[in-house]
Amino acid sequence: MFLNVLSIIIICYFYVFGLFILYITYLARKRGEQGAFFNNLIHAIVFIVAITINIILTNIFNSPNREFIEFPFNIIMTGFVLIFLPIFYLFISREKHRVKKRKIRYIHIELPSITQFPLKYDIYRKLTHFVVLGVIFFYFTSGFLNQNLVVFLVGISLIGLLTADIVRILKPEIYPLKPVNQLLREKELHMRLGPHISMSIGCFSVILLFGKIQPIGPVIICTSMVMSIFGDVTANLIGRTLGRRKIRKTNKTYEGLIAGMGAALFSGVIVLYILRNYYNFNIYTILIIPIIGMMTIGLLDYLDLEIDDNLTFNFCVSTILFFISISLL
């Protein structure tokens, strides 16, 4: 048997999300939002490819049941979807009724171009990264069963967040979480997927791609995500507070770039040292892997791609470090 029925249902549900992202990508191109187009396109490609490769890996490395999401979490995820969608639809219906009752006509208003939040709000946004950090260590250190629990939790979080963001983009007038828009930068509004979607897709994709290859996969996932989080947070905060020399015409600074690379390197070495009991790293590997990760993060930060760095940092660093570690070890 290739995959059981519940796995096929769950996979189809994720593929439907992938198609929705592609549709939003098409609309962004049609409306001339080039930044949103490239950002959404890469998200769709990463998401769909990760699911497809995981299906292949499931049949190679997984249990005889060959489940996309391990039992009993496949049953719970299916139940979550059956409960979540009607509840979210009720929120949408209530918002639609509220707008209609008050005879509010939704008008698209161009908001002022906000490229940077006040520092305290940026700190609030960055603090959410450390929630992901906690999930990462729980994923690695809690054993096989709870690793599948983390896959399930990240999966249902992605389902909920994507559902809401698709409604925000396609039907902004009935989006029930309009206050959330206040936490989005100007370029993150309209047809562009939100940064929380980038983080969710990044985490979910690398877990799908590398998590089944034990134990090196989880080790690299932990290391790369920790480096990405500390590198991103440090670069942002140091750049905002101490940065003086701008990188081209961006809001990023060389001071922030260097600080972020240093934080990424330091955190990577610490993580590999802590996890050395889970995998037999030699001293050279403990240094080489973080150095390569640091250089990757520095390059991505310097290039300042149109794609959200919550995706590029996690996905690119995890992928590069995984194949480097395979060749070294």
Image (cartoon, rainbow, N blue to C red):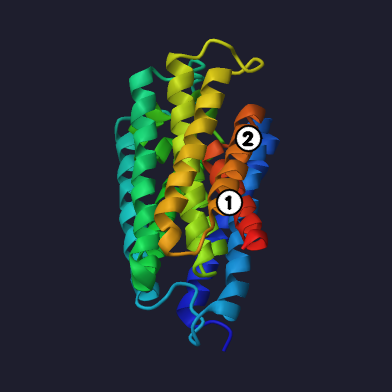
Residue 46 at what x, y percent from top left?
Answer: 62, 53
Residue 25 at what x, y percent from top left?
Answer: 64, 43
Badge 2 vs badge 1, beta-carbon distance below 8 Å: no
Residue at the farthest front position: 283
Give the class, few, some or many, for how many residues have Cα within 10 Å of label 1's Cα (few <14, many ≥20): few
**For mark 2, what is the residue?**
300
Check the picture and name the quadrant holding the N terminus: bottom right
| Element under disc 2 | helix
> Is 188 located above or below residue 59 in the figure?
above
* Front residue (pair 163, 71): 71
Q: Is residue 198 visible?
A: yes
Give the class, few, some or many, for how many residues have Cα within 10 Å of label 2's Cα (few <14, many ≥20): some
Of the residues tagged 2 and 1, which is closer to the observer? 1
Residue at the farthest top position: 244
Question: Which comes before the other along the chain, label 2 or label 1?
Answer: 1
Count the marks: 2
**For mark 1, what is the residue?**
284
* Front residue (pair 290, 237): 290
Residue 176 at what x, y percent from top left?
Answer: 35, 40
Left or right, 324 with respect to 199, comes to: right
Residue at 59%, 73% in the rendered image: 57
